Image: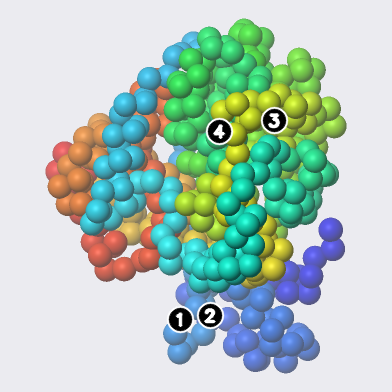
Amino acid sequence: MTSTLYQQIADDLARQIDEGSFQAGDKLPSIRKLSQQKQVSIATIQSAYELLERQQLIESRPQSGFYVREVIKTDLPAGEIQDNLQLPTRVSIKRTATEVLQRCQQPDMINLGTAIPSPEFLPVKQLQRIMGSLIRKRMDEVVVSVFPPGLLELRIQIAKRMAESGCRVSASEIVITNGCQEALTLCLRAVAEPGDIIAIESPAFVGLLQTIEALGMRAMEIPTDPRKGISLDALQLALEQWPIKAVALVPTNNNPLGFTMPDEHRQRLLTMLAKKEIPVIEDDLFGDLNYSGSRPKAIKAYDENGQVLYCSSVSKSIASGLRVGWVSAGRYQSQIEFLKSFSSVGTSTLSQMAVAEFLANGGYDRHLRRIQSAYAKQVQKMSEAVLKYFPAGTSVSYPQGGYILWVVLPTGIDTLQLHYKALDDNIGIMPGEMFSARDQYQNSLRLNCAIPWSDKVEQAIKSLGQLAVSG
């Protein structure tokens, strides 16, 4: 794909920063000066600088200009390949996970736990305008249920959006769901039965673990590198030892580690699983939130055999309360439609109509650019505060998109106990053991960065650090 002019300029500046021509703290040329040097428009330079901000390479300072940012790089340990993989296990986090999630959403809580963006980052006014118009002009349609596969005008818009991630699907190959969580549930039900083994990343998305538990399946945790994703060598070893029915993972802007799996790993994964006809359940919930400004290819983009069940929703990009998700399930499409029909029947008609209108005419791409930049800044500020206030030896992830930060504290600090202590200060966090079926990651935690940065939030991070030190 040919890059745009502003991307070329941004890439050139990024290269100069990487080579040391511009170092941390250096001031970059003003927008006007650089536009004259490059003989391009001011708008082009503005777009280039915005892209570099999203990539966390530079920062703007009011009334001063743009400066090279001190980049925080992860020192999380790489995932280790184990010769003796842990056994598949029943998942039993339901009660604890539900209680933790409920506590994090209590009134007056500084919610650093649940991965729900604050309204300040969402297109509230646009949605208000769209919904008001729909209620005034199309109320006779709003009050009628839309049965699976869902509203055609929405499925058309989703097919267009999926094309940007390299997926060649038509509207007829998409089923609308009540958020991504239902999409994952339908996919697991379509490919496996109670007692079957599902290979997952480790640490894994809490919602996936809860779903595996609810369906009576077993989880096979595969070591996962914080930069490249699931260990393919370890997965191959697991495939040789166990009758794995499916692999479920979050390859783009991973929750909770933040990495984006390299393209060559995606292709190798698909080839490996195709030989055994094992399906892939791809959770692409955070895919649109890449800081680079370009949309990574989905695993489904490489799927030639219909073995990838692709799931996503608008919960992280437009609004979680709308509960609009979807599945494009390849060879399992008819089974997904059947299961959807007899589980929740349909998805809110008003929500489907509103999302369809917003994707078509609501400025979705402008909205994405705004929140990509905002989330990159939020993650950077949260990372800096954690490393400043948490105990020595703490390390953080280096997300490439989204708004989730994974934090590893020194061994011996129990983050579930830290969660309970923090509640007294009205601070909610997600302890690391919620991301494993085997009680791993007890000294880790996940932070939600999609809340407006303020002195109050910084004080909350400081308090967490003090609580961690005090034991």
What is the CA distance from the residue labelled 4 to the residue labelled 2? 50 Å
Residue visible at 63% across and 31% down in the picture: 340
What is the CA distance from the residue labelled 1 to the residue labelled 2? 6 Å
For mark 4, does the 10 Å Cα neighbourhood hold few (<14), some (14 to 19), or many (20 or more) residues?
Answer: few
Residue assigned mark 4: 344
- Helix, strand or loop at label 1? It is strand
Residue assigned mark 2: 66
User: Circles 1 and 2: CB distance less than 8 Å?
Assistant: yes
Q: Whole-percent x and y of residue 286?
A: 58, 49
* Image mark for residue 61: 1
Q: Whole-percent x and y of residue 93?
A: 37, 25
Q: Earlier in the sequence, mark 1 or mark 2?
A: 1
Q: Of residues 193 and 290, which is closer to you in this image?
A: 193
Q: Earlier in the sequence, mark 2 or mark 3?
A: 2
Instruction: Name the residue type under label 2.
Output: Phe
Q: Earlier in the sequence, mark 1 or mark 4?
A: 1
Residue visible at 47% across and 52% down in the picture: 321
Residue visible at 38% across and 65% down in the picture: 452
Q: Earlier in the sequence, mark 4 or mark 2?
A: 2
Instruction: Name the residue type under label 4.
Output: Ser
Closer mark to the observer between disc 1 and disc 4: 4
Instruction: Name the residue type under label 1.
Output: Arg
Closer mark to the observer between disc 4 and disc 2: 4
Instruction: Name the residue type under label 3.
Output: Glu
What is the CA distance from the residue labelled 3 to the residue labelled 4? 11 Å
Quadrant in which residue 453 is drawn: bottom left
